[in-house]
Image (spheres, rainbow, N blue to C red):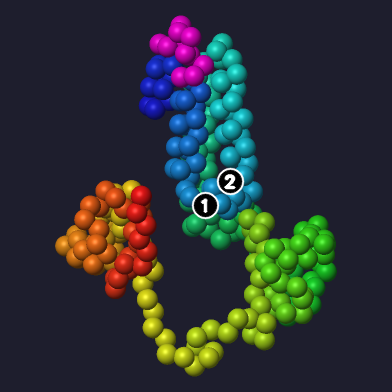
Amino acid sequence: CPALVLGSIATRMTGSGNAIVVRTVILYLLVVFSLRFMGKKQIGQLEPSELAVAIMISELASIPMESKDIPLVNGIVPVLILVCCEVLISWLILKNVKVRKYISGKPSILVDHGVLQQSALKDLRFTTDDLLEEMRMNGITNISDIQYAIMETNGQVSFVLKKSASTPTVEDLSLPIQDDQMPFPIVVKGEIYKDNLKRINRTEGWLNGELKKLHITNKKDILLLCANDKKVMFTQLK
């Protein structure tokens, strides 16, 4: 069990002056692992249940750090239990629409075709000043330009502009469309990212040929090189 292993390591070292440091490092690694295990969404898009778990994990991890008299396992085991509960809830949300509705809530329309939805604003306790602030942060100045403003379940407001207020696309301008693959980092600090090289369907031989064109003789001299399936898009040496 990871909890018992980590606890036993810290217990052996409690007699030394570095006990606090060791306990802090172990709990830090545990919290980082827990957030990574729960998924990347935890970092950028916290929903109510996820925010509650994140707060509780930080509180539980801080208790054994503050006092050496509290066994480290007392902080590790609850954190692992919370992680398991969150993973289970995430699975239920994925599989069951009703559970998703009660746990995560549902999006609410704040503006519908340029008209403020007063009942939705009232239910969410979201003022018109709050809405105007979100608009300014998204570069929108006129409510009548908004087709839909939607409060997402993570608390962020999404805006869909009317066609008359949207930036014209290539299709709108009837221009020829050619989809180019986005550039990927291929060499970073002299190290070749082979996975990205495969992603653009190129080989190290192709890369060496491109470096010759750029008069680069040593890959170790490269700080960053980005390329797509057609050519090298960006290069900067150390």
Residue at x 40%, y 11% (from the top left corner): 12
Q: Residue 217 in the image: x percent, y percent?
A: 21, 56
Q: Amino acid at mark 1?
A: Lys
Q: Nearer the viewer, residue 226 or 217?
A: 217
Residue that numbered label 1 is attached to: 41
Q: Residue 6 in the image: x percent, y percent?
A: 41, 22
**Relative to 137, residue 177 above or below:** below
**Relative to 77, residue 177 above or below:** below
Q: Is 174 displayed left or right of 104 in the figure?
A: left
Q: Which mark is residue 181?
A: none
Graded by Cα atoms within 10 Å as few (under 14), some (14 to 19) or many (20 or more), the crowding at tag 1 reads few
Of mark 1 and mark 2, the one earlier in the sequence is 1
Question: Residue 66 appears in which quarter of the rendering?
Answer: top right
Graded by Cα atoms within 10 Å as few (under 14), some (14 to 19) or many (20 or more), the crowding at tag 2 reads many
For label 1, the SS is: helix
User: Magenta segment, which residues?
Assistant: 12-22
Residue at x 83%, y 69% (from the top left corner): 118
Kindly indicate whether the residue at mark 2 contacts the one at mark 1 (C-beta within 8 angstroms).
Answer: yes
Residue that numbered label 2 is attached to: 50
Q: Residue 236 in the image: x percent, y percent?
A: 37, 57
